[in-house]
């Protein structure tokens, strides 16, 4: 797999990265094949539109076809947000024409890859790196508290959504052998954390977050660097993540050597 990845174009590697992200999100979900993509359905977490959406959309679906796909998601999970994800450039142009006049919001995410050796970065004094044991309920609860503090700054935040996201993460640990890396102080407080998921020669990093009171001290940088080193030590040729194109964290990742190699667009409309 390492050799196969090394011989691929950036576009092919980006597609592999997005596929690994889709696999991580889809753990424990029901996937319905549609003529133009997949409907991902998670009845246990109806407030999370990432896992109740139309994903990997290709071709030129009509509005009626998309409406039928949304109805499949709503029937399966009760989630009433309408979300579409595509990464094929011609499909993106088509969906822009179809969805933007219908009051959908548009967001661009980038696939970023590190193919050189992961750099070394130190955590601030007083913090230690923990690879969280999935059976350690106390540490998982501390990670959840940290992630909740991070999420509170998002416009979509609600306690119910945050709890459902924690449940999803625990399912990803249980069913997909994903792992949390956490920066922890002497009192057991988690200052920052991320999720690492290794599949098909790719170490995929997700859910990077630093609690507000610990920010601007290099914690996220050190965590991502440590995740990269761990993924490479396990034989993964590529360390990867996705980020919003216009958000500041993208520049943090670039300073660590991650390069943008592809884009994905999602469109979202509330109920």
Image: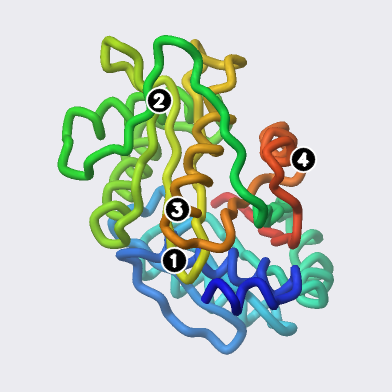
Q: Which structural element holds mark 3?
A: helix
Residue 211 placement, left or right of 143: right
Disc 4 vs disc 3: Cβ atoms closer than 8 Å?
no
**Local crowd size for mark 4, using a 10 Å CA cut-off: few (<14), some (14–19), many (≥20):** few
Q: Residue at x 77, y 40 (%)?
A: 246
Disc 4 vs disc 1: Cβ atoms closer than 8 Å?
no
Disc 2 vs disc 1: Cβ atoms closer than 8 Å?
no
Question: How many dots with numbers?
Answer: 4
Q: Which structural element holds mark 2?
A: strand
Q: Is residue 164 above or below residue 19?
A: above
Residue 266 placement, left or right of 28: right
Q: In front here: 131 or 11?
A: 131
Q: Which residue is mark 4?
A: 246
For marks 2 and 4, give the one nearer the viewer.
2
For marks 4 and 1, give the one nearer the viewer.
1
**Distance of mark 4 from mark 1, alpha carbons?**
27 Å
Q: Which structural element holds mark 4?
A: loop
Q: In front here: 237 or 204?
A: 237
For marks 2 and 3, give the one nearer the viewer.
3
Pinpoint residue 250: horizontal percent, then vertical percent: 71, 39
**Distance of mark 2 from mark 3, alpha carbons?**
20 Å
Q: Residue at x 80, y 72 (%)?
A: 89
**Local crowd size for mark 3, using a 10 Å CA cut-off: few (<14), some (14–19), many (≥20):** few
Which disc number belongs to residue 199?
1
Colour convention? rainbow
Q: Residue at x 81, y 60 (%)?
A: 101
Disc 1 vs disc 3: Cβ atoms closer than 8 Å?
no
Disc 2 vs disc 4: Cβ atoms closer than 8 Å?
no
Mark found first going from the N terminus, 2 or 1: 2
Q: Which residue is mark 2?
A: 183
Q: Is residue 149 above or below residue 156?
A: above
């Amino acid at each position: 797999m390492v050799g196969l990845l090394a011989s691929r174009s950036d576009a092919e590697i980006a597609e592999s990265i997005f596929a690994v992200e889709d696999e991580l999100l889809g753990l424990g979900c029901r996937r319905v094949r549609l003529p133009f993509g997949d409907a991902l359905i998670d009845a246990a977490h109806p407030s999370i539109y990432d896992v109740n959406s139309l994903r990997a959309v290709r071709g030129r679906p009509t509005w009626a076809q998309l409406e039928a796909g949304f109805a499949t998601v709503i029937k399966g999970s009760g989630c009433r947000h309408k979300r579409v994800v595509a990464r094929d450039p011609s499909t993106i142009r088509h969906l822009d024409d179809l969805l933007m006049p219908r009051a959908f919001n548009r967001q661009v995410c980038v696939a970023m890859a590190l193919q050189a050796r992961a750099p070394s970065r130190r955590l601030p004094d007083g913090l230690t790196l923990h690879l969280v044991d999935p059976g350690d309920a106390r540490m998982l609860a501390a990670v959840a508290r940290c992630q909740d503090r991070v999420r509170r700054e998002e416009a979509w935040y609600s306690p119910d959504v945050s709890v459902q996201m924690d449940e999803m993460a625990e399912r990803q640990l249980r069913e997909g052998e994903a792992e949390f890396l956490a920066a922890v102080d002497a009192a057991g407080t988690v200052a920052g954390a991320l999720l690492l998921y290794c599949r098909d020669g790719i170490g995929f990093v997700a859910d990077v977050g630093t609690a507000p009171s610990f920010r601007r001290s290099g914690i996220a940088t050190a965590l991502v660097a440590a995740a990269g080193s761990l993924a490479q030590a396990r034989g993964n040729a590529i360390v990867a993540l996705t980020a919003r194109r216009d958000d500041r964290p993208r520049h943090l990742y670039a300073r660590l050597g991650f390069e943008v190699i592809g884009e994905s667009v999602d469109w979202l409309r509330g109920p």
